[in-house]
Amino acid sequence: MQRVPNEVPLYLATGDGSPFAKVIPKMAEALRINGCTRVETGLINTSGHYVVEGQPNAVADLIERYASLRGESQ
C-alpha cells in the first residue's frame, strides 16, 4: 500500500527524565517511514514524563516557537 506523504509539522518531545526519552528517535523514524515528512524531536530538560506539569514554560515556549513557523513554510 502506497502512503501519501503527510507534510503536517510534528514536534515529538518528552522530558529528559521520562522513560520514553530513549525511544523518541525510534518513534520519529517510524513516523517518517510511514509518510510523515516533517517530524522533529527534542527533549525538555529537567523534566520527567509529565512535561506540562514539570516545565510548563518550556512547553509554552515550544508551542509558541513551532506554531509561529506554521505560516512561514506555506
Image: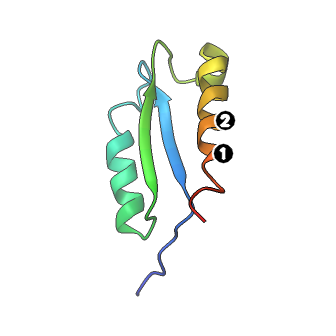
- State which quadrant residue 57 falls in: top right
Helix, strand, or loop for circle 2? helix
Q: Residues within 10 Å of mark 1 (few under 14, many from 20)?
A: few
- State which quadrant residue 68 falls in: top right
Q: For residue 67, which numbered disc appears in the image?
A: 1
Residue found 60% across the figure and 56% down from its top: 72
Separation of residues labelled 1 and 2 (CA atoms)? 5 Å
Q: Amino acid at mark 1?
A: Ala
Given residues 70 and 17, the one toward you in this image is 70
Where's residue 56, x and y in %? 66, 19
Q: Residue furthest front?
A: 72
Q: For residue 64, which numbered disc appears in the image?
A: 2
Given residues 36 and 65, the one toward you in this image is 65
Q: Quadrant of the C terminus?
A: bottom right
Is 46 situated above or below 16?
above
Residue found 41% across the figure and 21% down from its top: 16
Residue found 38% across the figure and 40% down from its top: 24
Q: For residue 1, which numbered disc appears in the image?
A: none
Q: Amino acid at mark 2?
A: Glu
Given residues 15 and 60, the one toward you in this image is 60
Pointer 1 and pointer 2: residues touching (CB < 8 Å)? yes
Where's residue 58, x and y in %? 59, 21
Q: Residues within 10 Å of mark 2 (few under 14, many from 20)?
A: few
Residue found 44% across the figure and 23% down from its top: 18
Q: Is residue 8 left or right of residue 67?
A: left
